[in-house]
Image (spheres, rainbow, N blue to C red):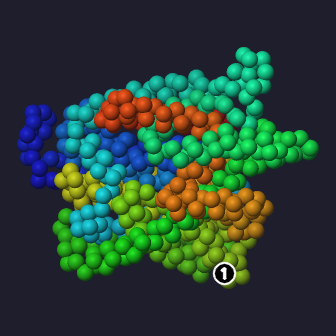
Amino acid sequence: MSDQTASQAGPITKGAYPELTPHAVIVGYFLGAIIALSIGYASLKLGFSIEGSELAAILGFGILRGILRRRSIVENNVTQTVASAVNGASSGMMFSVPAIFILGYGYDFNPYVLTFGAIAGAFLGIAFIIPLRKQMIDFERFTYPGGVAVASILKSPGAGVEKAKLLVAGALVSAVVYFFSDGADLELFNIINDVVGSEILPPYLNGAWYISLLTIGVGFIAGRGGVAFIIGGYVCYWLLAPMLDLTGMLPVVDGVKVTDPGTLRVTLFRPTGIGMLIGGAVIGVMFALPLIKSAIKSMQSSAKSESAMSADEMPIKLLYIAVAGAAILLGVMAITANEQVGFARGIMMAVLGTLWIWMAGIILSEAIGRTNWSPLSGMTLIAVTLLIIITQSFGGMDTGPAIVAAITVGAATCVAMSQATDLMLDLKTGYLVGATPRMQQMGQFFGAWLGPILIIVLIFVLNDAYGLGSDELPAPQGEALASMVKGITGGDVPTEKYVAGAALGGLLTALQGGLGITVGLGFYLPFNIVLTYSLGTLLREISDRKKGKVWSDNYGIPIAAGMIVGEALVGVVKAVLIILAAN
């Protein structure tokens, strides 16, 4: 229990505020499931995810305070910790597992083994990062902007309830719109051509707007942070395509000039975008090298400090047990991922995975603490590359089993890194609202097991209904990982476009962290998504200028978050109905 005491009238009138309670955990599970499914779905659409902690804090107020009449800020803090721990698997698995399906091995792996491995990875990520909490938050006081934003919500309980109402309203509107639109496009340029009676707007300009409030909501929340993504798409279709046409350099297939935007995307812009994602991710890791040095200093300082693990932290012996147990489970998973792996390779993969989780989790926590930017996709690419190299030891494995084994273990490391960064953000929030670290750490363990189970089911459902890597669900990060794996294993890939894209993505990321990845996503994704996303960015800019940033924070963002949740849940329900109808 926190030593804060209540002072307002209501259900809790005296004594310590409740913190880690059954109410907090159960509500956290419920909210975490909704958020994980929503953000997991959105990340397959757009290629990046958003933090779930803020959503969980807003919805937590709606349930804990609005419905259950509970008034403890630190209890809501545990709820958002549990919920974001559940959601930690969404980015971790959506950045890696879809690659197995895109490469055509979707039914050649054991989903139970992968799920238990992801849970083991989640526990490893949490256990490794806890000893550094005091050093990174109490002593070095890293900023963790995302954690500060959640703390500001928790400190405004009245506003939190109102935000929850707006979020639910946004979700209902978005759900209704998507139910009837069913992901259709508004073919604006075709309509203009029909009205004029002439093709004044060439087809490659691709002026179709995707009818999706989810996409507008993500654009609104990202605000100016998404401008680079928009520029990437506009450069492809409204700059490069006209220039190629004017210079007679548009691709020619069977003697016919290609002006269809879909064909241009598949043959030209998408492979370049994949290269940019890979190049941007790799250079992003190099960009983080100074942070590695700083992270090592933090580890050394933490080890020397006798107070590093004090009474308000989880007992260090329990963390040792968690690390040992999760590492053993990771080893079992590696050995059983495929019969060709064998004992020696399995142990090597487990040791590498465990060490990578330990090192990468610390680096990412330091990166997001200082810059609010995380090179998660780059760390995953490198981990899978190293694991594939191991599969070629002792005579080498066949290509298919090697890919399945490497990505299976790679998914566990990705989930671990995601959990480590999420926990540090939540602990920063707890530091600011006076929470007990031990309670939050236990909450993170309570929530971490549920996410992998939900996400693996979601992946199978969405793949069966729409197909991962399709126009409906492009899964850009999974596609980038799959393309890199193809290149390593000698598959047929458009090497020159990948290399050119990688050089451009690496250069952009060297100029600004993450820039190559966001611009590359604009190249990769269908332009109808980029156009609709730009509407969200435009609305956010108008909102900030006309109404002020406080209005955007208090009204705009909750509504936008609701738009994401409403459409995503309808999309998942529709996927389930498609599968049921097919069977």
Residue 49 horizontal/vertical position (percent): 49, 48
Q: Which of 347 and 302 is in front in this view?
A: 302
Residue positioned 10% across, 42% down in the render = 6
Task: Decide: is 453 above or below 381.
Answer: above
Residue 332 visible, this angle: yes
Task: Decide: is 507 above or below 358.
Answer: above
Residue positioned 22% across, 39% down in the render = 156
Residue 326 visible, this angle: no
- The kind of residue on which mark 1 rests is Ser
Residue 88 picture quarter: bottom left
Residue found at the very far bottom of the displayed protein:
394
Task: Decide: is 527 above or below 74.
Answer: above
Q: Mark 1 points at which residue?
A: 393
Residue 108 horizontal/vertical position (percent): 68, 59
What is the crowding at mark 1: few (fewer than 14 residues within 10 Å), some, or many (at least 20)?
A: few
Residue positioned 30% across, 62% down in the render = 142
Residue 528 picture quarter: top right
Residue 511 horizontal/vertical position (percent): 51, 60
Residue 211 horizontal/vertical position (percent): 58, 29
Q: Nearer the viewer, residue 372 or 70?
A: 372
Q: Which of 441 and 433 is in front in this view?
A: 433
Q: Tell me if 134 is positioned left or right of 196 in this view.
A: left
Which element is circle 1 on? loop
